[in-house]
Image (spheres, rainbow, N blue to C red):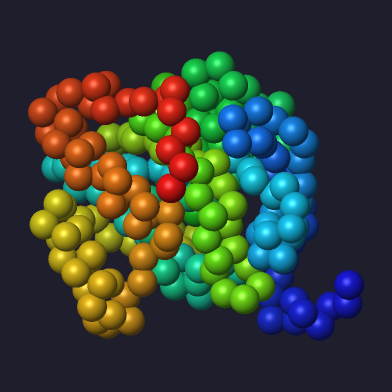
Amino acid sequence: MGDAPDAGMDDVQRRLMFEDECILVDESDRVVGHESKYNCHLWEKILSGNMLHRAFSVFLFNSKYELLLQQRSATKVTFPLVWTNTCCSHPLYRESELIEEDCLGVRNAAQRKLLDELGIPAEDLPVDQFTPLGRMLYKAPSDGKWGEHELDYLLFIVRNVSVHPNPDEVADVKYVNREEMKELLRKADAGEEGLKLSPWFRLVVDNFLFKWWDHFEKGTLKEAADMKTIHKL
């Protein structure tokens, strides 16, 4: 395959696409192998083969019950400039991120990426503070060439942190309360200000987020957790 199709790809993103090995799983979340991030996100490969891989989505709240959102950078290969939850990425095919007990591998990956994308130091995000609330399986095209097919772990964490976004990964950040989140949804639906939300974030918002917010405010978050089910959305 020549360089031409990827001529527009940012150098940092190209390096990550070829160096990072995602964890391939079946629909029951059993590990079946590994594949480059590049191949895992090519839409033609997603449609034709088994490119289902493990991912995670972090929902970081502060003590005022506000959710931290990020806008993906313009150089991201999939879903550039789209608003999404705090951090979304992949555990990699490496020992520390393959640990299945208590979702530790996924939590280790989340800690790594929150430093990488948002500059939040690991000591401010102890891995035992991430609460896994559920898993969902979804498939979504980004444009004609790229897309996602992921088994996504949904991780909740409440910490007051200082954020220093990495411009290679993140264009902007903001905290939203519940009403502001509803206003963002309205704008995205109306196509106002060119605002777009990532497909996985939208699935979580439509299926889980406001219920989580209720539990969080009541102090009953543990009741919201369901790690047995894999929601096929």
Q: Image height check: is 229 above or below 187? A: above
Can residue 20 be spotted in the picture? no
Residue under the image location 28 percent in, 35 percent down:
158
For the point 50% across and 68% down, the residue is 79
Q: Quadrant of residue 172?
A: bottom left
* Foreground pick, 61 / 179: 179
What x and y, as percent, mark residue 131?
A: 37, 27
Q: Residue furthest top?
A: 101
Residue 24 in sight: yes
Point out residue 203 in the picture as x, y percentages from the top left corner.
Answer: 36, 52
Q: Quadrant of the N terminus?
A: bottom right
How many numbered circles does the render carry?
Answer: 0
Residue 79 versus residue 9: which sits nearer the camera? 79
Q: Nearer the viewer, residue 20 or 118?
A: 20
102 on left or right of 84: right
x 26%, y 28%: residue = 224
Eyeballing the image, is 226 above or below 89? above
Q: Is residue 152 above or below residue 43?
A: above
Horizontal side of residue 79 vs 46, given as left or right: left
Q: Is residue 105 above or below residue 69?
A: above
Relative to 21, 117 lies left or right: left
Q: Position of residue 63 (x, y in %)?
A: 18, 38
Residue 6: x %, y % from top left: 75, 76
Task: Please tell me which residue is depicted at 25% across the width and 49% down the height of the picture.
Answer: 67
